[in-house]
């Protein structure tokens, strides 16, 4: 969702800059931002759910086997990329 939103947002800019008559340039940016927001919020919800499930499993006596919660680290990094992508579309 995040990558698709960035692509849609930047496609509107490219079409506008190349001289095409794009009436809905800002419409494409809004749709792009909506996709990015949906992706970021969905990923944030998944991270919160993963942390809660990990805590419940840990409290039940089932600790993590891997040393680092790689899924959580990657989720946070993708969130940062999504937020930066939204900033790029606004500029």
Image: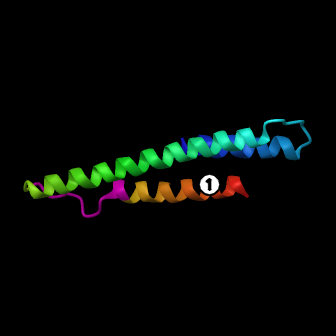
User: Which coloring applies here?
Assistant: rainbow
Q: Relative to 48, is 19 on the left or the right?
A: right
Main SS category, magenta section: loop
Crowd tier of the residue under label 1, counting other residues whose Cα lies within 10 Å: few below 14, some 14–19, many 20 or above: many
Residue 91 forms part of the magenta stretch: no
Q: Relative to 22, is 62 on the left or the right?
A: left
Q: Position of residue 22 (x, y in %)?
A: 84, 36
Q: Which residue does the image show at 69% across and 52% down from the upper left?
A: 89
Residues in magenta? 62-72
Q: Nearer the viewer, residue 45 or 81?
A: 45
- 66 versus 5 height, above or below: below
Q: Quadrant of the N terminus?
A: top right
Q: Which quadrant holds residue 72?
A: bottom left
Q: Position of residue 53 (x, y in %)?
A: 22, 50
Q: Nearer the viewer, residue 54 or 70?
A: 54
Q: Position of residue 15 (x, y in %)?
A: 83, 40
Where does label 1 land, which residue?
Answer: 85
Count of numbered badges drawn on the protein: 1
Q: Position of residue 76 (x, y in %)?
A: 43, 58
């Amino acid at each position: 969702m995040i990558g698709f939103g960035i692509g849609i947002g930047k496609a509107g800019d490219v079409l506008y800059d190349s001289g095409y008559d794009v009436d809905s340039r800002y419409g494409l940016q809004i749709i792009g931002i909506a996709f990015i927001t949906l992706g970021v919020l969905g990923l944030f919800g998944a991270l919160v759910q993963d942390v809660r499930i990990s805590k419940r499993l840990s409290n039940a006596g089932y600790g993590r086997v891997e040393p680092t919660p790689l899924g959580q680290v990657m989720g946070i990094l993708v969130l940062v990329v999504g937020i930066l992508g939204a900033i790029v579309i606004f500029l």
